[in-house]
Image (cartoon, rainbow, N blue to C red):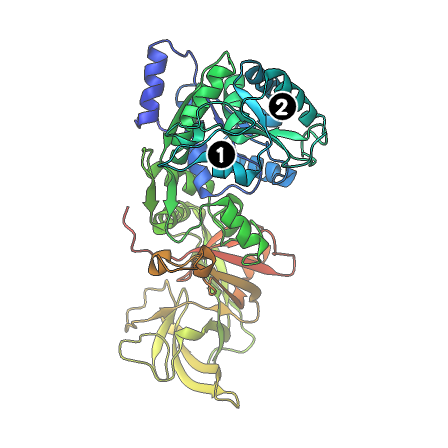
Amino acid sequence: MDNQTSNFIKDIMIKDLESGKHNKIVTRFPPEPNGYLHIGHAKSIFINFGLADDFNGKTNLRFDDTNPLKEDIEFVNSIKEDVKWLGFDWDDLLFASDYFEEMYKRAVLLINKGLAYVDDLSADEIREYRGTLTEPGKNSPYRDRSIEENLDLFERMRNGEFENGQKVLRAKINMSSPNINLRDPVIYRIAHATHHNTGDKWCIYPMYAFAHPLEDAIEGVTHSICTIEFEDQRPLYNWVVEQCEMENTPQQIEFGRLNITNTVMSKRKLKQLVDEGFVDGWDDPRMPTISGMRRKGFTPESIREFVRETAISKNNSMVDVQMLEHFVREDLKLKAPRTMGIIDPLKVVITNYPEGQIELLDAEINPEVPEMGMRKIPFSREIYIERDDFMEDPPKKYFRLFPGNEVRLKHAYFIKCEEVIKDASGKVIEIRCTYDQQTKSGTGFTGRKVKGTIHWVEATHAVPAEFRLYEPLIMDESENEGEEGKTFLDHVNSNSLEVHQGFVEPNMKECRPHDKFQFFRHGYFNVDPKDTTVDKLVFNRIVSLKSSFKI
């Protein structure tokens, strides 16, 4: 993180160290392996690892894998990859499932203390008995089972004698508590399912609210940092640690969630986008998953700077997505080589340029970083320009190419449009120009000036490429706020992906996956790691060149 940056969590840690309550800070990042990490998780990763680093403490990566029906080893591997890619390293790699036997013993302890019971009510009946925010709950008819009967039934649950949903184990706390989380929460349920880590050893699994505090206590976590929606769960967290007689007592601390405009920040909703085919996987570049952002071309440095800038507070925050894009621009402007690419090609023939001649022009790889050196660009009588850089009948103040007008070709010469060639349907398929040999870039030509500069790619050596341009996947939901029957899927942008077939400079032939470039006028692009092959280059646009966002 930053040793000079203060926040309320850091202040708590400082006091705990100074008072002698702890002699070492221990945090953990505890994802459930039921999906891919998203940008919101990046903030939690940054906080947990960063704060521990500030105090020379330790951070564990722990998988809260207590629900085999939704979890998979695929998600475990993706989470490990994402944490590493973001630039963080864990001290211990742990699994909640490693503690299942210990958790079972603690549940038995609660039964023996008269603080847990086996309930036969269905899930719907339990909800009905729980009451509301304004009305107390009522006791289950099975709440007063004897300790002996509960011990017998719980063991039989473990032995697989009952079907899914037939029985649960509930903590016995207070059905009249103003905090609904304390109204005898379910702490174990039956799930006959194969677990990615323990196989078929177990058919009962602890609920997250019971397992999580036990995991923290077992691991000696000092500060259990979580998002603000768990604030109401804190009394239950403390109750579990105390009543299960854990040796270590972690402190739960909540911070405000990070929300971003036009961005889904829910694993459940992201899974829905994947399952229903709105995107082509968890790593689709339109997804706010870490893997999707990596594939699109975001850098770990830009994400870390973004979450650092959003600060740590007790309140949820809404951040403009342009802020995130600002940081990747700032990171890439000094790293990405400059080049030219034509997304929507229109052929230009320079009629007075010698046939068969290829000229190599010089251009800086990155003008802001001269030490990156120069590159060579071929030039000949046939080039491609962007189709929207030509208009046959332009409006006023259009300074690009049109009949009779002259423009500069970036790094090359002035050219003047002399003739327009169309196909049978009237579509412009080629324009013919002349060039002025004296106007070559870098020669100090001062004879006359032109108002427009356009980019180009030499046609005979051009490398075909696919360009994928992205818009936000989710449109502004506030426009339809309150409309009945609407879900977030009604806000999916059907125009979030635009695909073009074009050309790049020949030196781009050696591109490798995740190479990043600034294409003149188009923005920053990343070589797609999934669909790029030896014979096909695919570029994902990370961000456009400019934004109105001010940091």
Judged left or right of residue 475, residue 184 is: right
Name the residue located 27 percent from the left edge and 49 percent from the top edge: 550
At which x and y percent is residue 150?
A: 62, 21
Q: Relative to 23, does residue 467 appear above or below in the rendering?
A: below
Q: Quadrant of residue 524?
A: bottom left
Judged left or right of residue 495, residue 549 is: left
At which x and y percent is residue 342?
A: 48, 67
- Disc 1 versus disc 2: nearer the observer: 2
Name the residue located 34 percent from the left edge and 77 percent from the top edge: 406
Q: To which residue does mark 2 refer?
A: 100
Q: Which mark is residue 12?
A: none
Name the residue located 48 percent from the left edge and 71 percent from the top edge: 344
The one nearer the camera, 452 or 193, is 193
Q: Residues within 10 Å of mark 2 (few under 14, many from 20)?
A: some
The one nearer the camera, 174 or 340, is 174
Whether residue 421 is visible: yes
Element type at mark 1: loop
Disc 2 residue type (three-letter): Phe
Residue farthest bottom in this picture? 424
Q: Which mark is residue 87?
A: 1
Judged left or right of residue 273, residue 232 is: left
Q: Residues within 10 Å of mark 1 (few under 14, many from 20)?
A: few
Q: Earlier in the sequence, mark 1 or mark 2?
A: 1
Are the two marked residues, 1 and 2, in contact with CB atoms closer than 8 angstroms?
no
Whether residue 515 is visible: no
Disc 1 residue type (three-letter): Gly
Element type at mark 2: helix
At which x and y percent is residue 485?
A: 43, 59
Alpha carbon separation for disc pair 1 and 2:
31 Å
